[in-house]
């Protein structure tokens, strides 16, 4: 091979290494999970603020969040490449590299990954405390009757406080996405809609298998049914002797 041919060859392979590859970064389950979660959380926030007869819908949105978060936790263990927690859980070294602008990778960046874990943990805590809460008027979570009044009231207080933390985290989440879109000219939203993203050459993504999907869906549905089944029927709850006003009515 002539010297010129080998120089050309090196140039071609260097060019190939720089050419971005288009991969299916977020598979359908992750995208359906994300936008369903947005809908469920928005519904829960609005109905929680409205209160009264809207609490029925608030409870249903809360149960959907339980199912979605359980699905995502299982999908994070056995799902597609970039959905897996081990894939994006950052090491301190990766975090430092990201903060110094040296991180190269595909999927959630190290700081984004921390916010994903924080969001999932907060959503899980928010939904769990909601199951034991009541609004002192006519609505209670499906597991309210499983704990004593003092604990239920503490969990209700926690449910309200966590909601503020969640709103702050969500505002930061949307602000970070906007920062990437407008200032860093990296549109993260389209991949969360279509799945596709141009990434550095060599990166790849594998879809989660159908068995993994069935397992994650089954565990999520089982969790929702278990929680719903624990709610006593209205007939099973005896009204207090003095007043029926303060008795929380199971509505799930
Ligand atoms: C209630 C509101 C929202 C919640 C609870 C929420 C939650 C989440 C969660 C848990 C993830 C991680 C996804 C995963 O790995 O499965 C995520 C990622 C993402 N979200 Fe949201 N989100 C919300 C609103 C939004 C909105 C309004 C947008 C668009 C402007 C958005 C855009 C994105 C994008 C682009 C990612 C991927 C980020 C990346 O590439 O690392 N989210 N969101």
Image (cartoon, rainbow, N blue to C red):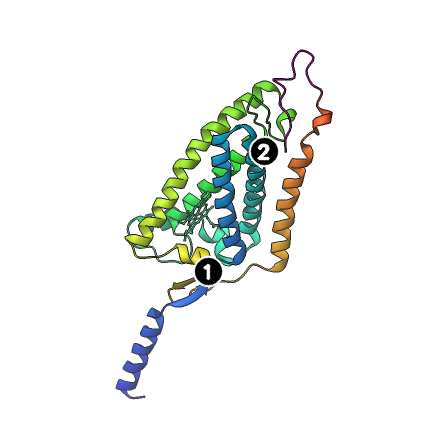
- In the rendered image, the residue lying farthest to the left is 4
Q: In which quarter of the image is residue 102?
A: bottom left
In the rendered view, does 45 fall on the left or right side of 136? left
Q: In the image, residue 130 lies at what x, y percent? A: 55, 31
Of callouts 2 and 1, which one flags the residue occurring earlier in the amino acid sequence?
A: 2
Q: Quadrant of residue 197?
A: bottom left
In the foreground, 26 or 80: 26
Total residue callouts: 2
Disc 1 is placed on an element classified as helix
Q: What stretch is highlighted in magenta?
A: 238-252
Residue 244 on the magenta span: yes
Residue 248 on the magenta span: yes
Disc 2 is placed on an element classified as helix
Q: In the image, residue 114 lies at what x, y percent? A: 41, 44
The disc label shown at residue 194, or none: 1
Mark 2 and mark 1: Cα distance apart in space? 33 Å
In the rendered view, does 195 fall on the left or right side of 215? left
Q: Residue at x 64, y 36 (%)?
A: 227
The disc label shown at residue 171, or none: none
Does the beta carbon at disc 1 come under 8 Å from ligand 1?
no
Q: Is residue 135 above or below residue 119?
A: above
Residue assigned mark 2: 56
Estimate how packed mark 2 is, as few (under 14), some (14 to 19) or many (20 or more) residues with alpha carbons within 10 Å. Answer: many
């Amino acid at each position: 091979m002539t010297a010129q041919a080998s120089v050309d060859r090196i140039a071609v392979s260097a060019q190939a290494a720089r050419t971005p590859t288009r991969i299916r970064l977020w598979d359908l389950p992750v995208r359906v999970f994300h936008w369903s979660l947005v809908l469920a959380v928005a519904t829960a926030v609005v109905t929680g603020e409205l209160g009264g007869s809207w609490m029925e819908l608030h409870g249903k949105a809360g149960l959907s969040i339980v199912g979605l978060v359980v699905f995502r936790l299982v999908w994070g263990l056995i799902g597609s490449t970039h959905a897996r927690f081990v894939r994006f859980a950052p090491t301190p070294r990766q975090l430092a590299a990201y903060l110094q602008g040296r991180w190269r990778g595909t999927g959630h960046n190290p700081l984004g990954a921390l916010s994903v874990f924080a969001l999932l943990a907060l959503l899980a805590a928010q939904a769990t405390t909601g199951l034991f809460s009541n609004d002192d008027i006519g609505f209670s979570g499906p597991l309210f009757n499983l704990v004593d009044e003092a604990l239920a009231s503490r969990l209700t207080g926690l449910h309200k406080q966590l909601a503020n933390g969640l709103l702050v985290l969500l505002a930061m989440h949307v602000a970070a996405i906007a920062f990437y879109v407008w200032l860093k000219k990296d549109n993260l939203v389209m991949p969360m809609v279509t799945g596709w993203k141009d990434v550095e050459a060599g990166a790849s993504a594998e879809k989660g298998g159908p068995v993994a999907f069935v397992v994650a869906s089954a565990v999520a549905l089982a969790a929702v049914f278990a929680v719903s089944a624990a709610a006593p029927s209205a007939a099973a709850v005896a009204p207090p002797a003095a007043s029926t006003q303060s008795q929380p009515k199971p509505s799930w």
